């Protein structure tokens, strides 16, 4: 992917998809639902070592549910995190690449099955044999690596600067940029300095695949740290490799307002993939269900999000292939209207 095409990359893909694209659902929480024990500083990246077949299966479940974009299992995979487990730098780099390969394998299996027409419910009325699919390489925040809840507070302390964050992410981003992924997904970005660090890295390293950025919010106005979403979105809007901006792992209740704030500062495609509305207790390392949004309610938001300006929609933690199937239905009805 040459940089010239970066500016139209996601626009072209959206046109292929009929105007709207479906992002996959929660990966780590779905691995857990299938029995994986992710109580570990590596979280979902633990499965890269212990059960890559399960990761492939979950990717495939999301593809079969209608996802157009699947996000790799590298969210919490960092060279520093691997090293703390006695995994060498070389092996760590191989695992990062492996996360993208596993997603690509799932796409190959999906394409193969689709071309053989082995699904009864495959015909979506568009005459397409299969959904177009992109593989995004996930990059989670420094706070995710710390695994101490700071991914949801965005508070890193004064010792952490744009420079330290760039040094932390540099090699990982280089490896993922050359892993065969179609784009990089910087996910659950909790503050402005990390967004700044990623944007500078993309330019300094002349990363040749496009990237999208998504932030998390606890209040509908600011990202997790309290920095304003509009300010964060403006910073990344000016980066030429950035093809989309949005929100993930945030309660569905806040999404509409956040889309409106982002729309004011960018004309790039907006992506949203909220969580189930539950909150994560970083100390206990568990999800607290009290404010969960029922699956039907989640889906009833989708039209509103599209009307507010989002064109890529999926789910994050605690959403499942059923959520994605339902989102896919809503979006395919809308797509036919485009
Ligand atoms: Zn999430």
Image (cartoon, rainbow, N blue to C red):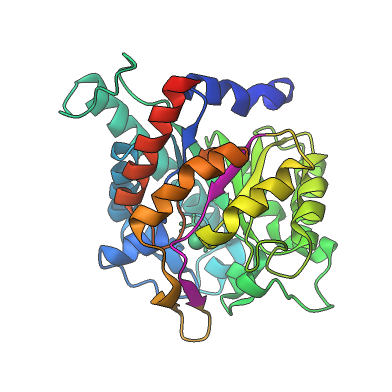
> Relative to 125, is 119 above or below?
below
Left or right of 169 on screen, residue 179: left
Q: Position of residue 188 (x, y in %)?
A: 60, 59
In the image, the segment drawn in magenta is: 269-280
Q: Give the residue drawn at x 57%, y 37%.
A: 307
User: Residue 94 location, x and y as percent?
Assistant: 49, 50
Taking the magenta stretch, the answer to whether it contains residue 273 is: yes
Residue 313 in sight here? no
Which residue is painted at 42% across and 25% down in the image?
A: 132
Q: Is residue 201 visible?
A: yes
Q: Residue furthest bottom?
A: 283
Q: Position of residue 34 (x, y in %)?
A: 25, 62
Q: Is residue 237 left or right of residue 32?
A: right
Residue 144, quarter of the rendered image: bottom right
Image quadrant containing the N terminus: top right
Let me know if residue 188 is in the magenta part: no
Residue at image coords 48%, 69%: 42
**What is the tally of numbered marks visible in this picture?**
0
Which sits in the foreground, 253 or 115?
Answer: 253
Q: Can you tell which quarter of the image residue 159 is in?
A: bottom right
Task: Judge by depth and name the residue closer to the eye, 25 or 207.
Answer: 25
For the point 60% across and 28% down, the residue is 10
The answer to whether residue 272 is above or below residue 89 is above
- Residue 76 x, y percent position in the rendering: 53, 63
184 up-or-down from 226: above or below = above
């Amino acid at each position: 992917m040459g940089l010239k095409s970066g500016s139209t990359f996601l626009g072209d893909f959206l046109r292929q998809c009929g105007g709207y694209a479906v992002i996959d659902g929660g990966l780590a929480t779905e691995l857990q639902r299938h029995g994986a024990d992710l109580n570990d500083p590596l979280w979902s990246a633990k499965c890269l070592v212990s059960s890559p077949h399960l990761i492939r299966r979950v990717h495939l479940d999301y593809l079969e549910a209608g996802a157009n974009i699947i996000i790799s299992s590298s969210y919490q995979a960092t060279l520093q995190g691997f090293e703390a487990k006695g995994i060498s730098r070389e092996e760590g780099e191989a695992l990062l690449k492996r996360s993208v390969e596993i997603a690509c394998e799932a796409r190959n299996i999906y394409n193969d099955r689709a071309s053989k027409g082995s699904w009864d419910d495959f015909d979506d009325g568009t005459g397409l044999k299969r959904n177009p699919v992109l593989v995004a390489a996930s990059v989670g925040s420094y706070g995710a690596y710390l695994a101490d809840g700071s991914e949801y507070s965005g508070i890193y302390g004064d010792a952490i600067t744009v420079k330290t964050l760039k040094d932390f992410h540099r090699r990982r981003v280089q490896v993922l940029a050359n892993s065969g992924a179609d784009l990089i997904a910087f996910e659950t970005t909790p503050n402005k300095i990390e967004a700044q660090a990623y944007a500078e890295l993309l330019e300094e390293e002349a990363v040749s695949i496009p990237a999208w950025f998504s932030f998390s919010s606890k209040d509908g106005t600011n990202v997790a740290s309290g920095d304003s979403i509009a300010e964060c979105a403006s910073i990344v809007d000016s980066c030429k490799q950035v093809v989309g901006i949005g929100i993930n792992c945030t309660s569905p209740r806040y999404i509409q307002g956040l889309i409106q704030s982002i729309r004011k500062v960018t004309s790039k495609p907006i992506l949203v993939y909220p969580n189930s509305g539950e909150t994560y207790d970083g100390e206990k390392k568990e999800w607290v269900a009290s404010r969960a949004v029922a699956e039907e309610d989640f889906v009833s938001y989708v039209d509103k999000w599209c009307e507010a300006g989002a064109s890529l929609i999926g789910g994050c933690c605690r959403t499942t292939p059923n959520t994605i199937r339902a989102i896919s239905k809503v979006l395919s009805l809308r797509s036919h209207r485009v």
